[in-house]
Image: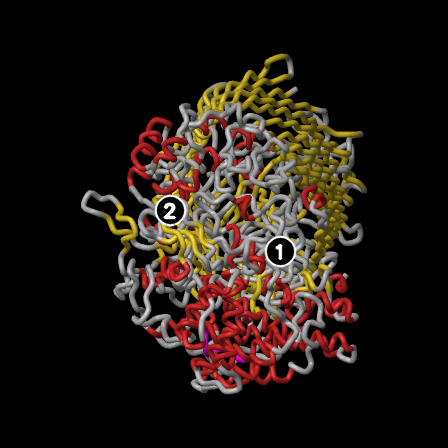
């Protein structure tokens, strides 16, 4: 034997590779390269040395003499194939669960401000809906349908190993706003229980793992990207214009109503919406400090106006990542720090409804108005009529609602590969997520108001939330012949603490309590273990167990144990397929897992607590006012809601993976569903409590298909298509629960949770129509035939969630040109048109000694008055299936724009086209109740990307 | 770190049992809640942290629901709003899912649970004399909740300790007996007449409630207890409470002072045996008198006359109530409808209002408006909320005038211990106040049962008594007495007699198999 030494370098950059593994083939002798890529090992001449490094193609070379220098090249394919799972990574081919990764090159382009938008339409079974068109607006992700009734259905977000508290941050529009989408390397969606089980309690609705970009390479490279976006309101709510409205009032109004008509023609919606612009700048650098500390740093700045006047979102983000590799690769340290500062100016959304209501014959200004000359419906006392809408232009101009949010997320992760036992890696990960917001709302004293002593108002608030994480786990990896074993065992502690404060000037003027404090804390403690066993790259087995305890549950029911098992068979590695020229990949997967959920459950439910009244709810005894103490509803028996999921899937790739895809079927049964249900108040201190009461089933099929019809040196064309079917049914619920608050009347609701139906099904009367097909006011089908129309005649009809969700996108690269198109379709989702139902009845036009505009649907119905049953007519439940062209982006790249610098310029249109039969403004309504919706603008983006 | 799982509330507004029952002074806050839960709706005021969920918070206030169930279902009131379940009340076609019948059951059952918990916890402090009174008052409030439960629902569970076990249903008569025995027992444990602080009950309240209980005994238990009604009415009449005769605003009658913003100090308080306290700044709700004032204002009425910033254009009355004052009408409009009355309890606004109702929904101008409740004091100053939103006026739940009428009715129904001439003199005391003179006085011969019923309408309309009165007279559902839109028909029609009782909430029945629904529902 002799000493063999040499240097391992990266083919692309010529930079030495540190930490590469060098093994004498067929033996257990091995080493790793040092900071300078050097290694030394004992081996015979003629022996084969294997060089491997994550993300690089492995190299085998024969020893011939004492020096052996090796050049390794990056394996793009392999990089892509490593997917992030909880507490580790796994090669895609070794994954056993339903896991989808979207990496940066497949992300949606255009004006993307939030992480969720990057993968909208890209992953089967994942529905992403924005709350509306406001800048920085929250995006709701639902994986495989609604998972719970009272608890949250949002997935768990894990950023670089830190599970986020998804309770949300005050003054912020979107819990993922802290992260600059440009810093994201990949997003991985864990959909089935066998892959999410390692996250236990909070992963019941799936997990979205976000991996950020890391430092790489030897030399520093820089990137600048910038874009300008122009936002254009596309459509308004269909209301009567001034002339039609004037005609109507002349027809139906009495003399005093006709006298109230003005002479103007005001399109109030046009007055409050505007075209808007936004800017986005990102700068990042990646490189290596001192040859052993890979580093990446980035700065981002976004400034975007909304189409509703006064709306602005600006965000500055900074992120830095160090990954020093020490002790010959035995000690890996990863430090992430991420800071965000956003300034929000929230436009006054009350103007959205008011602009629909306000009489179009009045002008915006009236010289006689005491309220800054804004036209106002005054009553005899010279204040605003308390039943009148407020001038929409005054609403947007005279209220200031701003907030600044600061958030820091940092973690330090240390991996130590034991010197004396290199098969074992010990990991400690410590994280901190701290956010802090300051907000204030100032309403001018000139704002029209019906308060007699109105002199403006000021309130401000601060929210502080702190989440601390401590993870410690050990990973054991060993190969025995054809067997390969990876085992992980660990402990996790996470605490969540919230501290909120609010000040209210009006309360202070009234002599009431004017400072309010709200605090709570919860703790989650867990043990987890996972074993991955791989035999001959053919048979893969994963078993996971996680034990979670939450402080939200009573000490006796606090621990939940969540096991999962999965099996996969790489058929393409079997002898009968190994040599196939057609099939490159064929994997069958089977999995079962159980996951708990208490997300969104209130704290301390099991304790007897008394709630002290605020000073506006004190009670007079004698001459004094006393703070009252109310015993709170309690439930000492709350336990984990448990979701049990079966998943079966197949992954395939044929013709050199020119056609690839996957198919999954799943069946999820959620047991001990926590729901807010009726309790007999004789037995508790309220009429509702959160209780483990029901069961719900989600079942579905999802398919993804990726095609590469053409790939040549000059031309690359790929098509991605995904489709998912989901069926959601409450299978056991003793009590029916009314949900879905609507506008119109006081306290009306339109949806119902009921056994045998999808959650949030619409609960409506069956409308009767005349021969011309017009609905007859007050006429409904007497479904139970008792000659009475009452609640018993209401039935469940459709629900807001799509039965089928599809995404179709394509990328075309021709020489230096690139074109991307993203489209989506939802089928079988229904919406309740609350704008039409609450604003299109005749009496409304002239009631309350004012004039109020009507929704144009009045001409379809002719309804005279608003009643509980009109509001609950199935006439207003409309098919909101849609096809949307979300995004078209065209780019051109100059690879050698100036020396080593590449430049890409692109243009993009977002929200280009919507095809739908739905009558409202937008068929894509989160929760299905279309009411005062902030319209999504169409946007046009121009951007550049410089790499140097 | 395992110990970290034992988290306890860190919010400054959250308290434990040990905090609340640490001393009699602290425990008074828990007692205040027992009163407040009949007047207010949650811990924030006017809305937020509601006591009852699943219904609009303002709507869930006790006296607002009492108005909904006992006035809107009768000839006294209609409302034009389309809130869920609300139009069904006047149409008399409510079902077991009705939001109002359901929420009232919740409110009263919750009050029972609050009282049970208080009584149990306060025992540890019971050696303090004041705490002894607290407990007696909590027992009164529990009895009062059950009094309403047996009136509205009949057979309900009788629960006297806090337990999560599903209760059994008790017969109406058992609960009646419980209310009776509790009131009899606490009459000596409560403070003397008017020796308690304002807003807290004394033993006269127990007597008054007993007299009202006995008056209804025939309907509720099929036992005639008119003599007991007279006995306890007599105790009330002999107490220090007195009919308000201070016409502080000088408009010729001392009646309207009962419903003004300063009715806790203008003399009216001497007539209030049990009242709910409101305050425009410190006790805010969208129910209570805030509701009664705002909801009744609309049309050509000026909100400032009522001390508020605007009306809600909801409540009106039917011609059937207006007719009760026909004998004293002094002026008529061109259609011959009365617009002025010598009996100044006829507090109606006729200008711009149609006498007859054609449309109830969304039409404030059909039916006379009612001007009884105001948020101004005797000098015409608006109440303490400078914004004009929340009302100061307290709301009498039991006032002495009611007991005068109980006395008269019990005597007429054959109760012994009283006499018809005394009864007539009591009625004349009320009528003299109403007319500002003896012009409306009656003779003992005029005093019939039907006269008393009409007099109750005149004296007590919109005070939450009407349905109970009509049921006692057998007129609530029957064909013998109809009013506009009774049964959903313009001229009025009879409805099934099972509607004399409201249904138990359908969802309570579905979770507690011990309960049997009232007949007909």
Quadrant of residue B11 in the image?
bottom right
- The secondary structure making up most of the magenta span is loop
Cα distance, mark 2 to mark 1?
61 Å
Is disc 1 on the same chain as disc 2? no
Quadrant of residue A637 in the image?
bottom right
Q: Nearer the viewer, residue A784 or A422?
A: A784
Considering every residue shown, the one lying at the far left of the view is A771
Residue matched to label 1: B248
Residues shaded magenta: B153-158
10 Å neighbourhood of mark 1: few (<14), some, or many (≥20)?
some
Q: Percent x, y for residue A66?
A: 76, 34
Q: Which residue is located at x 74 percent, y 54 percent?
A: A472
Q: Percent x, y for residue A546?
A: 63, 61
What secondary structure is marked by label 2?
A: strand
Chain letter for mark 2, please.
A
Residue matched to label 2: A830
With A815 as the anchor, is B126 left or right in this view? right
Quadrant of residue B40 in the image?
bottom right
Single out the mark in the foreground, 2 or 1.
1
């Amino acid at each position: 034997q002799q000493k063999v030494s040499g240097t391992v370098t990266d083919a692309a950059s010529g930079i030495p590779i540190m930490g590469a593994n060098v093994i004498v083939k067929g033996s257990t002798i091995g080493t790793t390269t040092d900071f300078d890529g050097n290694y030394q090992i004992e081996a015979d001449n003629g022996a084969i040395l294997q060089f491997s490094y994550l993300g690089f193609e492995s190299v085998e070379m024969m020893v011939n003499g004492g020096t052996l220098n090796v050049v390794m090249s990056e394996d793009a394919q392999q990089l892509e194939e490593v997917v992030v799972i909880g507490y580790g990574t796994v090669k895609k081919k070794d994954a056993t669960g339903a896991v989808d990764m979207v990496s940066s090159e497949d992300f949606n382009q255009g004006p993307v401000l939030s992480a969720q938008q990057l993968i909208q339409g890209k992953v089967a079974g994942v529905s992403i809906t924005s709350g509306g068109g406001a800048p920085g607006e929250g995006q709701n992700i639902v994986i495989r349908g609604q998972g719970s009734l009272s608890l949250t259905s949002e997935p768990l977000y894990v950023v670089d190993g830190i599970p986020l508290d998804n309770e949300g941050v005050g003054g912020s529009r979107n819990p993922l706003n802290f992260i600059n989408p440009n810093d994201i390397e990949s997003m991985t969606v864990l959909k089935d229980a066998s892959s999410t089980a390692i996250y236990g309690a909070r992963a019941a609705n799936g997990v979205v793992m976000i991996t950020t970009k890391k430092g790489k390479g030897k030399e520093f490279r820089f990137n600048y990207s910038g874009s300008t976006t122009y936002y254009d309101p596309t459509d308004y709510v269909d209301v009567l214009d001034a002339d039609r409205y004037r005609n109507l009032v002349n027809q139906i109004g009495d003399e005093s109503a006709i006298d109230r008509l003005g002479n103007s023609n005001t399109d109030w919606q046009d007055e409050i919406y505007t075209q808007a612009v936004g800017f986005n700048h990102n700068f990042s650098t990646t490189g290596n400090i001192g040859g052993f500390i890979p580093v990446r740093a980035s700065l981002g700045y976004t400034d975007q106006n909304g189409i509703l006047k006064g709306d602005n979102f600006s965000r500055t983000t900074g992120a830095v990542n160090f990954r020093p590799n020490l002790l010959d690769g035995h000690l890996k340290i990863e430090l992430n720090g991420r800071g965000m500062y956003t300034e929000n100016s929230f436009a006054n959304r009350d103007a959205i409804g008011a602009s629909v209501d306000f009489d179009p014959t009045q002008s915006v200004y009236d010289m006689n108005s005491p309220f800054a000359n804004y036209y106002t419906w005054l009553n005899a006392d010279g204040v605003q009529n308390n039943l009148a809408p407020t001038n929409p232009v005054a609403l947007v101009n005279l209220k200031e609602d701003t907030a600044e949010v600061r958030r820091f997320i940092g973690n330090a992760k240390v991996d130590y590969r034991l010197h004396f036992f290199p098969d074992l890696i010990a990991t400690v990960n410590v994280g901190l997520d701290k956010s802090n917001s300051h907000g204030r709302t100032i309403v001018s004293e000139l704002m029209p108001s019906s308060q007699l002593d109105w002199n403006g108002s000021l309130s401000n608030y601060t929210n502080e939330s702190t989440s601390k994480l401590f993870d410690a786990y050990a990973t054991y990896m060993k190969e025995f012949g054809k067997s390969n074993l990876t085992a992980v065992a660990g402990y996790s502690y996470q605490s969540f603490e919230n501290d909120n404060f609010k000040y209210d000037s009006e309360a202070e003027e009234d002599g009431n309590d004017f400072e309010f404090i709200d605090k709570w804390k919860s703790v989650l403690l867990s043990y987890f273990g996972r074993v991955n066993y791989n035999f001959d790259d053919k048979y893969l087995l994963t078993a996971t167990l996680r034990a979670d305890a939450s402080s939200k549950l009573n000490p006796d029911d606090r621990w939940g144990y969540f096991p999962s098992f999965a099996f996969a068979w790489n058929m393409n590695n079997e002898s009968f397929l190994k040599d196939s020229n057609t099939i490159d990949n064929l994997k069958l997967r089977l999995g079962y897992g159980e996951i708990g959920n208490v997300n969104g459950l209130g704290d301390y439910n099991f304790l007897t607590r008394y709630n002290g009244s605020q000073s506006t709810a004190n009670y007079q005894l004698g001459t004094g006012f006393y703070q009252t103490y109310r015993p709170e509803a309690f439930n000492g028996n709350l336990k984990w809601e448990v979701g049990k999921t079966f998943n079966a899937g197949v992954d395939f790739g044929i013709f050199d993976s020119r056609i690839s895809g996957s198919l999954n079927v799943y069946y999820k049964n959620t047991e001990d569903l926590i729901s807010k249900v009726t309790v007999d108040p004789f037995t508790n201190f309220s009429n509702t409590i959160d209780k483990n009461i029901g069961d719900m089933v989600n079942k579905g099929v999802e398919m993804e298909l990726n095609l590469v019809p053409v790939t040549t040196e000059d031309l690359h064309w790929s098509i991605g298509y995904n489709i998912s079917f989901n069926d959601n049914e409450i299978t056991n619920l003793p009590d029916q629960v009314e949900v879905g608050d609507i506008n119109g009347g006081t306290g009306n609701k339109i949806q119902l949770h009921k056994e045998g139906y999808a959650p949030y099904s619409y609960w409506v009367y069956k409308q009767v129509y005349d021969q011309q097909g017009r609905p007859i006011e007050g006429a409904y089908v007497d479904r139970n035939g008792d000659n009475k129309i009452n609640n018993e005649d209401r039935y469940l009809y459709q629900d807001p969630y799509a039965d089928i969700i599809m995404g179709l996108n394509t990328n075309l690269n021709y020489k230096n040109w690139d074109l991307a198109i993203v489209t989506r379709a939802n089928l079988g989702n229904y919406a309740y048109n609350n704008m039409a139902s609450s604003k299109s009845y005749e009496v409304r036009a002239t009631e309350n000694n004012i004039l109020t505009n009507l929704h144009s649907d009045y001409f379809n119905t002719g309804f005279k008055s608003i009643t509980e049953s009109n509001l609950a007519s199935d006439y207003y439940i409309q098919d909101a299936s849609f096809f949307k062209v979300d995004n078209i982006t065209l780019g051109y790249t100059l690879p050698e724009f100036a020396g080593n610098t590449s430049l890409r310029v692109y243009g993009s249109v977002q929200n280009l086209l919507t095809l739908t039969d739905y009558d409202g403004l937008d068929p894509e309504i989160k929760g299905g109740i279309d009411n005062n919706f902030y319209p999504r603008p169409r946007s046009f983006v121009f951007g550049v990307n410089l790499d140097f | 770190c395992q110990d970290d799982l034992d988290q306890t509330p860190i919010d400054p507004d959250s308290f434990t049992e040990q905090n609340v029952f640490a001393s009699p002074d602290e425990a008074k806050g828990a007692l205040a809640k027992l009163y407040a839960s009949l007047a207010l709706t949650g811990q924030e005021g006017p809305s937020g942290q509601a006591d009852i969920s699943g219904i609009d918070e303002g709507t869930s206030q006790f006296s607002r629901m009492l108005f909904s169930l006992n006035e809107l279902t009768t000839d006294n009131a209609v409302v034009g709003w389309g809130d869920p379940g609300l139009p069904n009340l006047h149409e008399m076609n409510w079902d077991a899912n009705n939001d109002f019948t359901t929420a009232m059951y919740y409110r009263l059952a919750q009050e029972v649970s609050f009282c049970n918990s208080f009584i149990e916890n306060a025992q540890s402090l019971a050696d303090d004399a004041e705490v002894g009174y607290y407990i007696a008052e909590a027992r009164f409030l529990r009895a009062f909740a059950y009094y309403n439960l047996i009136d509205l629902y009949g057979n309900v569970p009788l629960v006297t300790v806090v337990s999560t076990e599903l209760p059994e249903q008790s017969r109406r008569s058992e609960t009646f007996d419980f209310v009776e025995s509790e009131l009899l027992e606490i009459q000596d444990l409560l403070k003397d007449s008017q020796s308690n602080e304002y807003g807290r009950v004394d033993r006269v309240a127990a007597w008054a409630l007993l007299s009202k209980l006995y008056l209804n005994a025939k309907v509720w238990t099929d036992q005639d207890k008119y003599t007991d009604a007279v006995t306890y009415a007599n105790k009330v009449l002999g107490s220090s409470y007195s009919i308000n005769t201070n016409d502080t605003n000088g408009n010729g009658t001392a009646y309207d002072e009962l419903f003004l913003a300063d009715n806790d100090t203008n003399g009216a308080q001497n007539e209030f045996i049990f009242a709910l306290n409101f305050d425009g700044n410190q006790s805010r709700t969208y129910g209570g008198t805030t509701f009664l004032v705002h909801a009744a204002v609309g049309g050509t009425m000026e909100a400032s006359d009522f001390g508020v910033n605007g009306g809600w254009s909801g409540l009106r009355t039917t011609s059937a109530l207006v007719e009760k004052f026909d004998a004293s009408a002094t002026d008529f409009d061109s259609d011959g409808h009365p617009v002025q009355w010598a009996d100044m309890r006829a507090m109606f606004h006729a200008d711009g209002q149609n006498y007859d109702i054609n449309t109830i929904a969304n039409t404030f101008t059909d039916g006379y408006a009612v001007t009884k409740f105001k948020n101004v004091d005797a000098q015409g100053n608006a109440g303490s909320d400078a914004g004009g939103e929340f009302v100061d006026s307290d709301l009498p739940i039991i006032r002495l005038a009611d007991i005068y009428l109980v006395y008269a009715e019990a005597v007429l129904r054959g109760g012994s211990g009283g006499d018809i001439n005394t009864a007539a003199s009591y009625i004349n005391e009320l009528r003299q106040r109403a007319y500002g003179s003896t012009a409306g006085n009656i003779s003992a011969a005029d005093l019939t049962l039907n006269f008393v019923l009409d007099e109750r309408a005149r004296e007590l309309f919109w005070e939450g008594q009407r349905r109970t009165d009509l049921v006692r007279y057998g007129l609530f559902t029957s064909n013998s007495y109809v009013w506009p839109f009774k049964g959903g028909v313009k001229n009025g029609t009879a409805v099934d007699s099972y509607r004399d009782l409201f249904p138990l909430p359908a969802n309570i029945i579905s979770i507690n198999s011990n309960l049997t629904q009232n007949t007909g529902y």
